[in-house]
């Protein structure tokens, strides 16, 4: 077992695809919430393997896409200050604020560094005690325990030149918001497997029941995604709406208690704004009072920013699965990965960028 | 979102629980990974790794379930 | 935002046209192309430059010459399987070889940073000498300059090269025909991963060595054996995908590749999984694609596989008979995916 190749097996893929074709009667819209799954769906051409009556909707599951522009502007303002080393995951560097992106700050002389793990940023702070090291702590529940650990260790070891700019959002409130939207067309959800490896799936059970919508916790390889879709269709065709766990090799119902404990130690739940969607109550995390000293927003004070202006871009409706990238008049014309108009084109995981890269011109 | 990759633990450095680190192999590439959240995982176990942290231990019997299920689909199909 | 109504969300309009050079301009992707198309081509517009081949083919009297230049900036200077010296020789030798030329002479310009240990310089120069001897070229002219500490990465090297074309084949993208086979001389992605692995910040332990190697001998063996080569391209930054996308665009033809036929070592693919990279876009320094008629495939593969630089040679796809300009990858699971130029360099992702 290598936990990868097996799940890319052509024979298994086609068997599941045939089964989906065999049982599908109705027309269904299945939303994958997670950008990683969007990426895999495009990369492996999963939609080619589905009956025409199944439509995949691509959800807001990309922390890079949904980080609000004013927070990116804050990051850019902090990163441009002398005496600051600004650390970020690679994919956040290219996301533009209102004027420029973090790569442009680096080109203008800012010390912007790409790290693989928040602990790498903490190590930089250890090594450079006379500089302020700021880490851009973005992510969903998957990344929260890693980011929380960096803050916890900073306090534990007294590394006071370290702080985090938090843009930490939560999946279940976003799913509920999508289901509450009056125009919602979502028949079922693939729940994000790696988020669930941390939080489990208890939180989804009440949502599935209340909105009578199947939710299947799903992995990221072709066999996983197709199995997840198969489970959704089985439920939809038989009128059931429960939570199922396709990704049981990595996900337990209760999640990862040790990771959750660390999240609770460092963070409290707060309202958060999602780029392209707006404020969602109790949909994010903020450092608790005990760790407030490590909050870059407090350390660096208020930074001015301008508000977003509406354009032809329809990324908001795409994030909610109401529209598809091709429905946007700007898609592929005035809006490309080099010159993105909206959140969904900005990140390589965004639905528009994934369409552009893998399928746009088919 | 959330790129996380399965890897096999090849060694563990257990100096303190918060800093529980280990070396994890990804097809022969070795990386230092924080194992604080997978206290039950030992050398030889597979974990799923994101941003330098093991999120969870992978369960082999559960991993095979997908394929057992596929087998069932195959058995149901009229040949 | 005053209106929290989720059905009418705000749409962000970020600005992303760069008014300065960013690292992505050097990544070989779309930003690099923009730079060439918007700044360099208009300034030096001529029919030879416009072909945008690895080396320019010049008619000088009766003789056809290949001429090329390349600059080498690599961090760290020494990496598993090579160093900036061997890279600077092999890279330029390979660019000459891609026109089917026999490389003869190189120049070297070294920009040295104040503080570079002489020991390191000596190692690099020795390595250049060894690489030149192996590739049977002579380094016949050079230059050195020194810049202030902090204004260079130890050393930058520019090499230019001249070679002679001793056959009548025209090897160029314009020669690519529908139905042609696409051969690759070995597994991909090793150079990029080896360099990345030795770079601070992303540290991982690996035994992967760069594939850095001279390819002229392999190419000349094919030509000497009478193999009718239509086009050659060495795979450098931007990897296999970028090279083929560029070729397809210049030839005004499409291509279809079989993913399962493209060799990638397990450890290279492991490193790519961790970083979220696609090995098809990772850099190589000893790999080429050779595009030729179907009838020549068996002979070419036999010659390549018998050569140290072609042991892992494989037939990876074909030029499409229909005009569609796209490079399409047929996945292992039988579905198709379009390969497109990346915007800039690949950045490690978490999502």
Image (cartoon, rainbow, N blue to C red):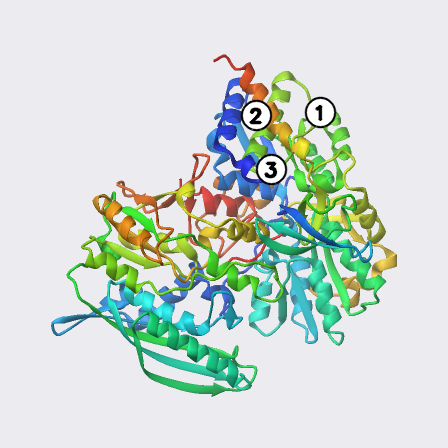
User: On the same chain: label 2 and label 3?
Assistant: yes
Residue placed most toward the observer, C149 or C304: C304
Indicate which disc residue A1 carries.
Answer: 3
Question: What secondary structure is marked by label 1?
Answer: loop
Q: Name, please, the residue furthest toward the left.
A: C62
Q: Earlier in the sequence, mark 2 or mark 3?
A: 3
Q: Residue at x 88, y 58 (%)?
A: A290
Q: Is residue C195 left or right of residue A283?
A: left
Q: Position of residue C15 (x, y in %)?
A: 54, 60
C196 over A32 or under it: above or below: below
Q: Name, please, the residue furthest toward the front.
A: C306
Residue designated by label 1: A242
Q: Which chain is mark 1 on?
A: A
Indicate which disc residue A28 carries.
Answer: 2
Question: What secondary structure is marked by label 3?
Answer: loop
| Residue at mark 1 to residue at mark 3: CA–CA distance | 30 Å
């Amino acid at each position: 077992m290598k936990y990868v190749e097996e799940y890319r097996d052509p024979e298994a893929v086609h068997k599941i695809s045939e089964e989906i074709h065999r049982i599908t009667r109705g027309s269904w819209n299945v939303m994958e919430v997670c950008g990683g799954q969007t990426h895999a769906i495009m990369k492996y051409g999963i939609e080619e393997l589905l009956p025409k009556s199944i439509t995949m909707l691509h959800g807001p599951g990309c922390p890079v896409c949904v980080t609000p522009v004013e927070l990116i502007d804050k990051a850019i303002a902090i990163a441009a200050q002398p005496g600051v080393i600004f650390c970020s995951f690679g994919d956040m560097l290219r996301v533009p604020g209102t004027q420029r992106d973090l790569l442009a700050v680096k080109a203008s002389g800012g010390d912007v560094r790409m790290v693989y793990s928040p602990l790498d940023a903490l190590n930089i702070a250890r090594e450079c005690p006379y500089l302020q090291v700021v880490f851009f702590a973005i992510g969903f529940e998957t990344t929260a325990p890693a980011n929380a650990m960096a803050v916890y260790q900073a306090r534990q070891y007294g590394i006071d030149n370290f702080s985090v700019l938090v843009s930490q959002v939560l999946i279940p409130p976003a799913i509920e918001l999508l289901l509450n939207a009056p125009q919602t067309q979502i028949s079922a959800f693939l729940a994000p497997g790696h988020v669930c490896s941390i939080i489990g799936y208890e939180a989804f059970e009440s949502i599935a029941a209340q909105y009578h919508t199947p939710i299947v916790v799903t992995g990221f390889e072709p066999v996983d995604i197709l199995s997840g879709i198969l489970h959704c269709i089985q439920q939809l065709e038989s009128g059931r709406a429960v939570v199922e766990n396709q990704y049981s090799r990595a996900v337990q119902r209760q999640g990862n208690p040790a990771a959750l404990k660390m999240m609770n130690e460092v963070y409290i739940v707060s309202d958060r704004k999602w780029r392209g969607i707006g404020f969602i109550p109790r949909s994010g995390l903020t450092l608790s009072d005990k760790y407030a000293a490590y909050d870059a927003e407090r350390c660096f004070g208020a930074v001015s920013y301008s508000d977003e202006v509406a354009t032809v871009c329809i990324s908001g409706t795409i994030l909610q699965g109401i529209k598809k990238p091709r429905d946007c008049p700007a898609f592929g014309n005035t809006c490309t990965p080099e010159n993105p108009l909206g959140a969904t084109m900005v990140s390589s995981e965004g639905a528009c960028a994934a369409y552009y890269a893998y399928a746009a011109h088919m | 979102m959330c790129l996380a990759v399965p890897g096999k633990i090849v060694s563990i450095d257990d100096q303190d629980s918060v800093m529980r680190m280990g070396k994890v192999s990804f097809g022969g590439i070795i990386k230092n990974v924080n194992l604080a959240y997978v206290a039950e995982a030992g050398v030889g176990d597979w974990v799923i790794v994101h941003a330098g942290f093991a999120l969870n231990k992978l369960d082999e019997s559960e991993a095979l379930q997908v394929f057992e299920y596929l087998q069932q689909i195959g058995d149901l199909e009229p040949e | 935002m005053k209106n929290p109504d989720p059905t009418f969300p705000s749409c962000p309009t970020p600005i992303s046209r760069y008014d300065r050079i960013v690292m992505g301009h050097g990544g070989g992707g779309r930003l690099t192309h923009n730079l060439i198309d918007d700044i360099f081509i208009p300034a030096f517009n001529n029919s030879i430059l416009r072909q945008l081949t690895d080396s320019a083919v010049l008619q000088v009297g009766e003789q056809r010459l290949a001429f090329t230049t390349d600059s080498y900036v690599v961090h760290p200077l020494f990496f598993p399987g090579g160093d900036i010296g061997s890279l600077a020789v092999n890279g330029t030798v390979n660019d000459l070889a891609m026109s089917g030329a026999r490389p003869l002479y190189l120049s070297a310009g070294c920009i040295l940073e104040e503080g570079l240990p002489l020991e390191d310089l000596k190692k690099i120069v020795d390595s250049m000498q060894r690489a030149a001897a192996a590739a049977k070229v002579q380094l016949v002219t050079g230059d050195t300059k020194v810049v202030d500490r902090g204004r260079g990465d130890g050393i930058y090297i520019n090499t230019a090269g001249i070679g002679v074309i001793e056959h009548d084949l025209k090897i160029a993208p314009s020669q690519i025909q529908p139905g042609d086979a696409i051969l690759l001389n070995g597994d991909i992605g090793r150079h990029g991963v080896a360099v990345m692995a030795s770079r601070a910040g992303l540290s991982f332990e690996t035994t992967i060595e760069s594939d850095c190697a001279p390819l002229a001998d392999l190419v000349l063996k094919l030509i000497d054996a009478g193999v009718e080569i239509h086009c050659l391209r060495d795979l450098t930054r931007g990897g296999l995908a970028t090279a083929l996308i560029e070729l397809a665009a210049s030839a005004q033809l499409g291509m279809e590749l079989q993913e399962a036929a493209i060799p990638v070592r397990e450890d290279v693919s492991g490193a790519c999984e961790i970083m979220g990279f696609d090995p098809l876009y990772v850099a190589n320094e000893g790999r080429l694609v050779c595009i030729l008629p179907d009838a020549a495939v068996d002979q070419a593969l036999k010659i390549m596989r018998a050569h140290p630089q072609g042991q892992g040679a494989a037939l990876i796809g074909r030029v499409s008979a229909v005009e569609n300009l796209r490079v399409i990858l047929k996945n292992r699971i039988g579905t198709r995916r379009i390969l497109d130029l990346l915007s800039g360099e690949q950045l490690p992702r978490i999502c």
